[in-house]
Amino acid sequence: MNASSSLAFIKRNDLLKLLSDNEVASVSLAETAVQLSDGDEYLDLSNLDKGVRSARKETIPMGRVLPRKALTPETWSNILAQLAPMRTALAATRL
C-alpha cells in the first residue's frame, strides 16, 4: 500500500467515526438503494481526494458512498473540515 492510499484509508476511518449511530443506520439504508437521485451530494469513500461530488445519471457503487442526505448538517460540516487537510496532503504526495 502506497503512502497516499494509506492516508486515504486512515482518513476514511476517521471520517466514519464522526457519524452518530442514527447516521450509520441511515448510511446503511442508503447502501441498499439502487442509486442516488440526480443532484444528490456525496463523498466517494474510495476517492476522497475528489471531494464532494454530485450524482448524475451514472451508476455509483452505493457501498462506497457517503450521501450528504444521510447525515446531519453538523456531521457533514465536520467531515468536510477534516477532509480539507487530507486533500492537501494527498495532492502533495502526487507531486
Image (cartoon, rainbow, N blue to C red):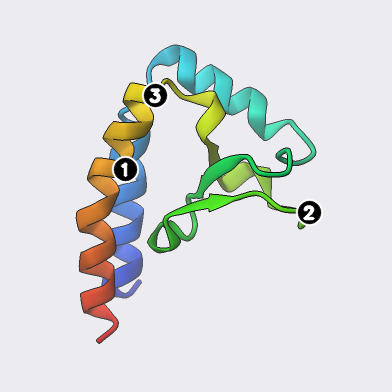
Q: Is residue 44 above or below residue 92?
A: above
Q: Residue at x 66, y 44 (%)?
A: 39
Residue 69 lies, in percent from the top left, at 55, 27
What amino acid type should be assigned to the residue bearing mark 3?
Pro
> How far apart, in angstroms, are the residues tagged by discs 2 and 3?
25 Å
Residue 80 as seen in the image, left or right of residue 52: left
Q: Residue at x 22, y 65 (%)?
A: 88
Q: What's the mark number on residue 80?
A: 1
Q: Is residue 83 above or below residue 22?
A: below
Mark 2 sits on what residue? 57
- Occupied quadrant, residue 87: bottom left
> Could you say which is closer to the camera, residue 88 or residue 7?
88
Q: Earlier in the sequence, mark 2 or mark 3?
A: 2
Residue 91 lies, in percent from the top left, at 27, 74
The answer to whether the residues at label 1 and label 3 have Cβ atoms under 8 Å apart is no
Q: Earlier in the sequence, mark 1 or mark 2?
A: 2
Residue 23 lies, in percent from the top left, at 47, 19
Q: Secondary structure at mark 3?
A: helix
Q: Secondary structure at mark 2?
A: loop
> Could you say which is closer to the camera, residue 49 or residue 2?
49
